[in-house]
Amino acid sequence: MSPAQQILDYRKEIDDNQKQVREMVMESYRDIAEGKGRDYNEFFNELEKRYSDVRV
């Protein structure tokens, strides 16, 4: 795989991760608005796990 392709693949992975994180945040906001609430520890643990497992 060429270095240029590696960079493009890496960029796509970063973009996909950002989209997933944004959706998680919005899901939590919707839950709060509906009164469901979500344990903030659970939410932030999910975010932390997602980024601590990412290879840089």
Image (spheres, rainbow, N blue to C red):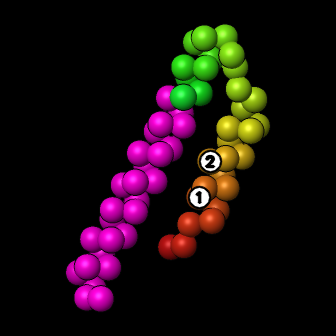
Q: Which residues are magenta?
A: 1-26
Residue 52 vertical placement versus 35 (above, below) = below
Looking at this rendering, what residue extends furthest in the bottom direction?
A: 1
Q: State if disc 2 and disc 1 touch (CB < 8 Å).
A: yes
Q: Quadrant of residue 29?
A: top right
41 and 35: which is toward the camera: 35
- Dot 1 surroundings within 10 Å: few (below 14), some, or many (20 or more)? few
Q: Position of residue 51 (x, y in %)?
A: 59, 58
Q: Is residue 45 left or right of residue 14?
A: right
Q: Can residue 31 be found in the magenta stretch? A: no
31 and 11: which is toward the camera: 31
Q: Which residue is mark 2?
A: 47
Q: Amino acid at mark 2?
A: Leu
Residue for point 60% across, 56% down: 50
Residue 4 vertical placement versus 15 (above, below) = below
Q: Which residue is mark 1?
A: 51
Residue for point 56% across, 66% down: 54
Residue for point 53% across, 33% down: 25
Q: Is residue 31 left or right of residue 8?
A: right
Q: Position of residue 23 (x, y in %)?
A: 47, 36
